[in-house]
């Protein structure tokens, strides 16, 4: 019996020494959920979202964890695939909230899964740092939801206005997805075209994952548009739209008002067919901080990195800043208020502030400068920096 007690005491001492030698304390765990399309048509975006959250977690963990009121927390990212579908968003949120007991979620990507996830996050005071262009995602009744990506409501008009002034093209074909996201984007893009004097000569909607766009595109090209607006098409859909337009002999301008993932799109369409594609970018693809983040990304994840990674990297770091300022990982009311009343100097996207009171009735929509870019020889070239 004496021997057993000495062994137990020795084990305790060895454990104490190990804990002391590893930095005087063992970091506790802070779980962060991720909901994103990790497969299917939106996978390029979803994988980028997850990467942004994981790289931000890597940053704070490299500093010994997130320091909250004197306690260090090791950040653990738990990710679920919503397949870019409403049911997937609901299932993932249900699991994160009730099984994993998370208080903070990055994502979802897209309006349908986002609205479904909110059925679980808002009543349970779980903070959502998401995407999705639907105006229904933000509002006074949804105070725990923040959007750290800009939507077409913020950038469509200034971008389309710049294109009209630069190229003087007035007749446009318009193509978008036949779902909540597509309809919300159209609700911003179509009035923006009208506001600058453009005429929409054709308007078509497709199901995500469509392989053959030629019947739809034939109708659009029959109207002889000056340009084709493919809206915020997902990388896989956008790449096929561009490729098939060029295969049909259309050499005019194609614009993509929203939807990062340009390199994935070029890979599908091919550099030659991607010429004369002008698009929205939330980042300067050749900026020093972006290239630094890209190097880290490519060392850990399959390339290429798209612009959702920098946005959710900064958005997750902003969340960490708010948790630290609030001094709690459990009281999400305090964290919500700290986040809502702060600004952030994003390493990747720059000065980030909240806006949205006039549009959504609450300041939960991020605002930062964006870029109009063009594809030339398979490369992304900045044409203009615009402050909304």
Image: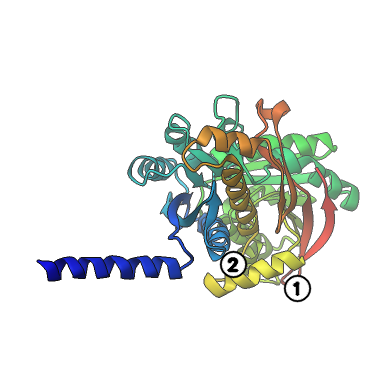
Q: Please name the residue that numbered disc 2 is placed on.
A: 268
Q: Quadrant of residue 129?
A: top right
Q: Which one is in front, 326 or 39?
A: 326
Q: Quadrant of residue 354?
A: top right
Q: Which mark is residue 86?
A: none
Left or right of 267 in this view: 202: right
Q: Quadrant of residue 214?
A: bottom right
Examine the rendered structure and indicate whether residue 149 appears above or below residue 290: above
Number of residues whose C-alpha sits closer than 10 Å to that of mark 1, classed few (under 14), some (14–19) or many (20 or more): some
Q: Are marks 2 and 1 in contact (CB under 8 Å)?
A: no
Instruction: Give the quadrant of the C terminus.
Output: top right
Point 57% across, 58% down: residue: 56
Q: Secondary structure at mark 1?
A: loop
Q: Earlier in the sequence, mark 2 or mark 1?
A: 2
Instruction: Give the quadrant of the N terminus.
Output: bottom left
Residue 316: x percent and y percent? 58, 51
Instruction: Say whether residue 299 is visible.
Output: yes
Q: Which one is in front, 140 or 215?
A: 140
Left or right of 234 in this view: 369: right
Q: Please name the residue that numbered disc 1 is placed on.
A: 377
In the rendered picture of this protein, how many numbered marks are placed on residues?
Answer: 2
Point 34% across, 40% down: residue: 98
Point 71% across, 58% down: residue: 347
Residue 143: x percent and y percent? 57, 30
Distance from Cα at disc 2 to Cα at disc 1: 15 Å
Left or right of 7 in this view: 192: right
Q: Secondary structure at mark 2?
A: helix
Furthest residue toward left: 1
């Amino acid at each position: 019996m004496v021997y057993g007690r000495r062994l137990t005491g020795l084990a305790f001492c060895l454990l104490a020494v190990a804990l002391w030698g590893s930095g005087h304390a063992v970091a506790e765990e802070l779980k962060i959920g991720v909901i994103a399309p990790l497969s299917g048509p939106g996978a390029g975006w979803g994988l980028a979202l997850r990467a942004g959250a994981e790289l931000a977690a890597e940053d704070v963990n490299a500093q010994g964890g997130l320091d909250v009121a004197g306690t260090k927390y090791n950040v653990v990212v738990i990710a679920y695939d919503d397949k870019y579908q409403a049911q997937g968003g609901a299932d993932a949120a249900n699991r994160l909230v009730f099984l994993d007991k998370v208080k903070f979620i990055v994502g979802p990507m897209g309006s349908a899964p986002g609205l479904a996830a909110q059925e679980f996050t808002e009543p349970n005071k779980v903070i959502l740092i998401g995407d999705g262009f639907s105006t229904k995602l933000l509002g006074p009744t949804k105070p725990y939801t923040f959007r750290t990506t800009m939507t077409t409501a913020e950038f469509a008009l200034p971008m389309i206005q710049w294109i009209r002034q630069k190229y003087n093209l007035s007749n446009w074909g318009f193509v978008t997805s036949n779902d909540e996201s597509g309809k919300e984007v159209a609700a911003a893009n179509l009035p923006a075209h009208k506001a600058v004097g453009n005429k929409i000569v054709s308007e078509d909607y497709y199901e995500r994952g469509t392989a053959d766009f030629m019947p739809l595109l034939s109708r659009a090209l029959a109207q002889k548009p000056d340009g084709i607006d493919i809206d915020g098409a997902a990388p896989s859909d956008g790449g096929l739209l561009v490729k098939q337009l060029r295969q049909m002999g259309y050499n005019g301008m194609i614009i993509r008002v929203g939807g990062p993932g340009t390199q994935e799109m070029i890979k599908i369409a091919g550099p030659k067919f991607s010429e004369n594609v002008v698009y929205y970018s939330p980042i300067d693809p050749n900026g020093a901080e972006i290239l630094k983040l890209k190097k880290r990304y490519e060392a850990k994840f399959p390339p290429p990195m798209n612009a959702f990674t920098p946005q959710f990297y900064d958005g997750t770091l902003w969340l960490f800043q708010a948790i630290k300022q609030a001094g709690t990982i459990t009281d999400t009311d305090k964290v919500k208020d700290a986040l809502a009343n702060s600004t952030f100097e994003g390493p990747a996207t720059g000065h980030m502030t909240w806006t949205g009171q006039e549009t959504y009735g609450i300041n939960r929509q991020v605002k930062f400068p964006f870029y109009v870019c063009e594809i030339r020889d398979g490369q992304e070239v900045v044409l203009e920096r615009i402050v909304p």
